[in-house]
Image (cartoon, helix red, strand yellow):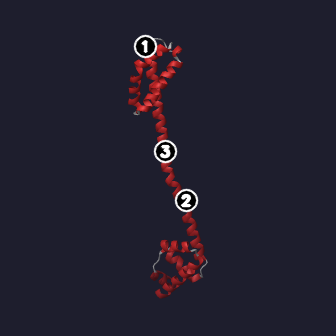
């Protein structure tokens, strides 16, 4: 095939192929690139394509069609990957949050476990079991005022045992 023949084929089919491809990929620049690539492939394989107009036209249209479908498939793969990443990214902070929460709770538990027995028991019942002062007083056979005073004393001891930010967090979570 001669260069003049390629120029004639290009002039005849380029605009049609760009329009055809644009209808598939919906991107003008991409459609132009795909059409140009089809002519390059045709030029490289011109010896294997019959020299009649129908064969040339079929080769160009099928090349453009296949390339456009590949672009769409690739776009779907990229979109799926990005969608998967978007879904996975929020999970990572959740995992970190859970780890931090577990460490904070463990430190608070250790601090409560180090309290004297009566303060420890009242703290567990109040903060972890969610019992009211009256319920604690009834279960431990003591007055509500004693429960309140011992809870207050337990908080003072926890303030000394926990770092300031941990104590503040404890107050936010359990008060």
Q: Residue at x 56, y 68 (%)?
A: 104
CA–CA distance between discs 1 and 3? 43 Å
Tag of residue 171? none
Q: Residue at x 55, y 74 (%)?
A: 164
Q: Residue at x 55, y 69 (%)?
A: 105
Q: Residue at x 49, y 44 (%)?
A: 82
Sequence-wise first label, 2 or 1: 1
Asked if disc 2 and disc 1 are in contact, CB closer than 8 Å, the reply is no
In this rendering, would 126 be left or right of 106? left
Q: Label 2's element? A: helix
Residue 90 rendering spot, x and y as whole percentages: 49, 54
Of residue 111 and residue 119, the one placed in the foreground of this image is 111
Residue 123 rendering spot, x and y as whole percentages: 53, 78
Q: Label 3's element? A: helix
Is the residue 137 above or below the residue 52 in the image? below
Q: Label 1's element? A: helix
- How many other residues sit within 10 Å of disc 2, few (<14), some (14-19) or many (≥20)? few
Tag of residue 82? 3
Is the residue 87 above or below the residue 25 in the image? below
Residue 18 rendering spot, x and y as whole percentages: 41, 26
Residue 19 in view here:
yes
CA–CA distance between discs 3 and 2? 22 Å
Q: Which is more foreground, mark 1 or mark 3?
A: 1
Sequence-wise first label, 3 or 2: 3
- How many other residues sit within 10 Å of disc 1, few (<14), some (14-19) or many (≥20)? few
Count all numbered tags in the image, as a single digit: 3
Of residue 58 and residue 6, the one placed in the foreground of this image is 6
Q: Which is more foreground, mark 2 or mark 1?
A: 1
Of residue 34 and residue 130, the one placed in the foreground of this image is 34
Which residue carries the number 1 mark? 53
Tag of residue 96? 2
């Amino acid at each position: 095939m001669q260069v003049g023949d390629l120029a004639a084929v290009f002039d005849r089919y380029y605009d049609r192929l760009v329009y055809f491809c644009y209808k598939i990929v919906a991107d003008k620049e991409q459609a132009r690139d795909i059409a140009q690539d089809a002519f390059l492939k045709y030029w490289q394989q011109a010896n294997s394509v019959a020299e009649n107009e129908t064969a040339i036209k079929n080769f160009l249209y099928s090349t453009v069609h296949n390339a456009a479908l590949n672009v769409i498939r690739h776009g779907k793969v990229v979109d799926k990957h990005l969608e998967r990443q978007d879904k996975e990214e929020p999970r990572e902070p959740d995992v970190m949050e859970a780890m931090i929460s577990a460490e904070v709770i463990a430190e608070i538990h250790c601090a409560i476990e180090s309290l004297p027995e009566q303060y420890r028991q009242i703290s567990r019942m109040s903060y972890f079991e969610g019992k009211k002062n009256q319920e604690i007083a009834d279960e431990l056979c003591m007055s509500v005022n004693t429960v309140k005073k011992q809870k207050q004393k337990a908080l003072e001891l926890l303030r000394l045992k926990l770092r300031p930010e941990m104590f503040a967090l404890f107050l936010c979570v359990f008060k």
